[in-house]
Amino acid sequence: MERLKGKKQIEQLFITGVSVGAFPLRMVYLKGGDKHLVGVSVSKKHFKNAVDRNRIKRLLRVAVEKQLAMTLEKMESKFCLMVLYVGKEMPNSPQLKEQFEFLIKRFNKKEAHEL
């Protein structure tokens, strides 16, 4: 898995991507490409301090590496996806992990339904 970079890729993802949510997380994804691209984002509107935003992004990246990587490896198609934290309160690690697992379940269910 590689990091999602580039303005054009991110714009394309948000314009044509499919969204799935499990509050306080939301994932926008697009099927296609030759490798998995993953990005994380936290709203500057809700978290003014960069320290807080960076902490949440670090927690999200750990969750992506541990949980989402296993799920994506099992799938035959490649995805471009962005994980967004849309909550207004600072999360703790166990709570974020639980919500991320729920988000992955919804993602799997939606992808299985589309096939």
Image: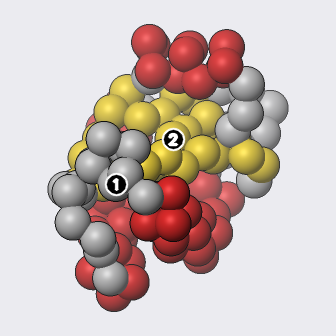
Q: Which residue is mark 2?
A: 82
**Amino acid at circle 1:** Phe
Question: Toward which corner of the image does residue 54 lie, by quadrant?
Answer: bottom right
Density class for disc 1 (Cα within 10 Å; few <14, some 14-19, many ≥20) is some
Q: Is residue 57 visible?
A: no
Upstream in sequence: badge 2 or badge 1: 1
Q: Is residue 60 above or below residue 76?
A: below
Give whichever of 47, 6 is nearer the camera.
47
Label ID, residue 47: 1
Specify whether 89 is left or right of 4: left
Q: Which mark is residue 107?
A: none
**SS type, badge 1:** loop
Answer few, some or many: residues within 10 Å of disc 2's Cα (few below 14, many 20 plus, some between 14 and 19). many
Amino acid type at mark 2: Met
Q: Is residue 57 left or right of residue 69?
A: left
Residue 10, image x and y in percent? 59, 24
Report the number of numbered marks. Answer: 2
Q: Is residue 85 above or below residue 35?
A: below
Quick one: 44 or 99, which is closer to the camera? Answer: 44
Q: Image height check: is 93 above or below 84?
A: below
What is the quadrant of the C terminus in the image? top left
> Can the viewer see residue 24 in this picture?
yes
Residue at the image position 63 percent from the left and 46 percent from the top: 38
Q: Residue at 66% x, 19% y: name it.
A: 7
